Image: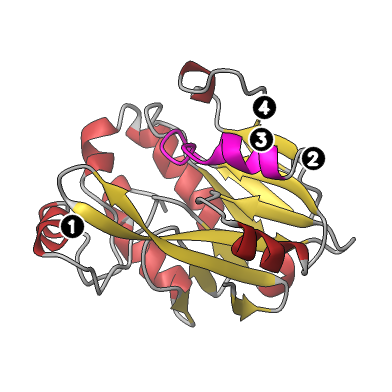
Amino acid sequence: MLRAIVEDVWAYEKDFRMPVVGHLPSRTTVVRRADGGLVIHAPLAFDDESAAAVDALGEVRALVAPNCFHHLFLKAASERWPRASVLGAPGLEKKLSGLRFTPLPRSGVAPEIGDDLGVRLVEGVPYITEHVFLHARSRTLVVTDLLFNVHEVRNFAMKAFLWIGGAWRKTAQDHLWRVLMRDRAAAARSVADILAWDFDRVVMAHGDVVEGDAKEQLRRALAWIGAS
C-alpha cells in the first residue's frame, strides 16, 4: 500500500490513466510532521485499504494540490479526510467547483501544513503554478511535474509520449515547461532559491526517486532556465 522512502516520508504509487497515451506511473507523497500529523501531497485515488494504511501512520491534517494539473482526486480526498485542511495552487479555483481551499504561499511555510515543509513557487509558468516543498528533517525535496524520472511504463504510447517530451528514461523536465514559460527570469530566481536548499533526495510525482546526487541532477535538468 505505502512504501517508505525515508523516515517520516512514504510513497503511495499507482498508474494514472491519461487519455490516448495510457498509464503514467504516479506517486502521492505522505509526510509525517514533527507533531505526528500527516500531509498528503498530490493525492491520487485512495480506496479503503490504502486509506487505512495512511490512517495507521497518523491523523491526516493537510491535503495539498501542488500545481494546476494535480487536482483530480483532491475533492475525493477531502471527503475521505474531512477534518484535514485543503491547500492548492492559485488558479485551481477555475478548475475546482464546490471545494474551497487555501492558496499555497509563494514561499516560506503554510500554517496549515506546518513548519516541517518549506514552500517555493516556481514562478514564471502561470499555467502550471507548481509549488515545490522541502522536508528539511530528511533533506527531501518533493516536486510534482518539475522533474520526471520514468524508466518503465506499461505501453508503447506512453513511452512515445515521454520520449517526445524529452523525459523518457532520464532525470529531466518535460518540454511542456518550455512551451508554457512566460517569465524565464522569474523562473530562474525560483530555481536558484530551490537549489540553495539543503537536500540530497528528490521525490517526484512521476518516476523513480533520485537519491544521492539529487541536487546536481536537478541542476542539470533545469540548466536551460538559467538559474545561477
Question: Which residue is disc 1 drawn over?
Answer: 162
Viewer-side residue, 115 vs 35: 35
Give me the residue at 19% from left, 65% from top.
168
Mark positioned earlier in the residue sequence (2 or 4): 4
Residue span colored magenta: 67-80
Label 4: how many Cα within 10 Å (few below 14, some 14–19, many 20+): some
Residue 77 lies in the magenta stretch: yes
Q: CA distance from mark 3 to mark 2?
A: 8 Å
Q: Earlier in the sequence, mark 1 or mark 4?
A: 4
* Residue depicted at 17% across the width and 58% down the height: 158
Q: Which residue is mark 4?
A: 101
Q: Tags 3 and 2 in contact by the CB under 8 Å rule?
A: yes
Q: Nearer the viewer, residue 146 or 30?
A: 30
Image mark for residue 200: none
Whichever of labels 3 and 2 marks the residue nearer the N terminus, that label is 3
Spatial CA distance of label 1 from label 4 is: 32 Å
**Is residue 197 visible to the viewer in this orientation of the structure?**
no
